Structures are given as C-alpha cells and as structure tokens.
Image (tube, rainbow, N blue to C red):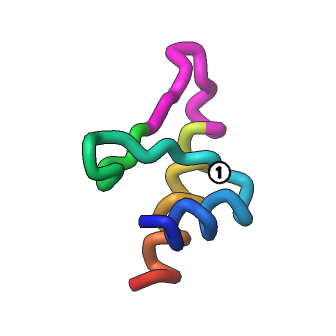
Amino acid sequence: LTELLGTARDAGLLLMPSGKSRHIIRLLIPLTIEPDVLHEGLDIFERCLAALA
C-alpha cells in the first residue's frame, strides 16, 4: 500500500490510508467535484494500480 500511495502522489493524486491496519484507501471526494476532474483522478488511480500489478 505504501508503494501505491507514493506512486499516486508522484502522479499528483493524494490518497488517504485508513483502518486499524492502514490497509484501506479512502477517497475523499467533494460533493461539488466536476465530472471531468473525477474521471481524471480515477484514471490516475487506475494507472497507478496497473503500474504496480
């Protein structure tokens, strides 16, 4: 998870680990987010996951 958080941060996406064991990723998305910004963030997240697979 640490590697994923670092990869995402380097790509401009901030993720927040959560849970007792810090094994959950929380997405803190504002209710007023524009759809294109949401898709951009999810695309970055998907690329980061693929890079670590």
Residue 11 to residue 26: above or below = below
Choose top left, top right, bottom left or bottom right for residue 6. Answer: bottom right
Magenta highlight on residue 29: yes
Compare residues 29 and 5 and report the one nearer the observer.
5
- Residue at horizontal 36%, vertical 41%? 18
Which secondary structure lies at badge 1?
Answer: loop
Q: Residue furthest left?
A: 20
- Residue at horizontal 51%, vertical 51%? 42
How far across and how far down the image is residue 24, in percent? 31, 48
Check the picture and name the quadrant holding the C terminus: bottom left
Q: In the image, 51: left or right of 21?
A: right
Q: In the image, 44: left or right of 26?
A: right
Q: In the image, 42: left or right of 44?
A: left
Q: Amino acid at mark 1?
A: Leu
The stretch in magenta equals 27-37
How many marks overall? 1
Compare residues 35 and 13 and report the one nearer the observer.
13
How far across and how far down the image is residue 3, in percent? 52, 72
Q: Residue furthest top?
A: 32
- The residue carrying pointer 1 sits among few (fewer than 14), some (14 to 19) or many (20 or more) residues within 10 Å by Cα, namely some
Magenta highlight on residue 6: no
How far across and how far down the image is residue 25, in percent? 38, 47
- Residue at horizontal 73%, vertical 54%? 12
- Residue at horizontal 65%, vertical 38%? 37
Q: In the image, 48: left or right of 17?
A: right
Magenta span: predominant SS is loop
Per the image, the residue denoted by label 1 is 13
How far across and how far down the image is residue 49, in percent? 44, 71
Check the picture and name the quadrant holding the N terminus: bottom left
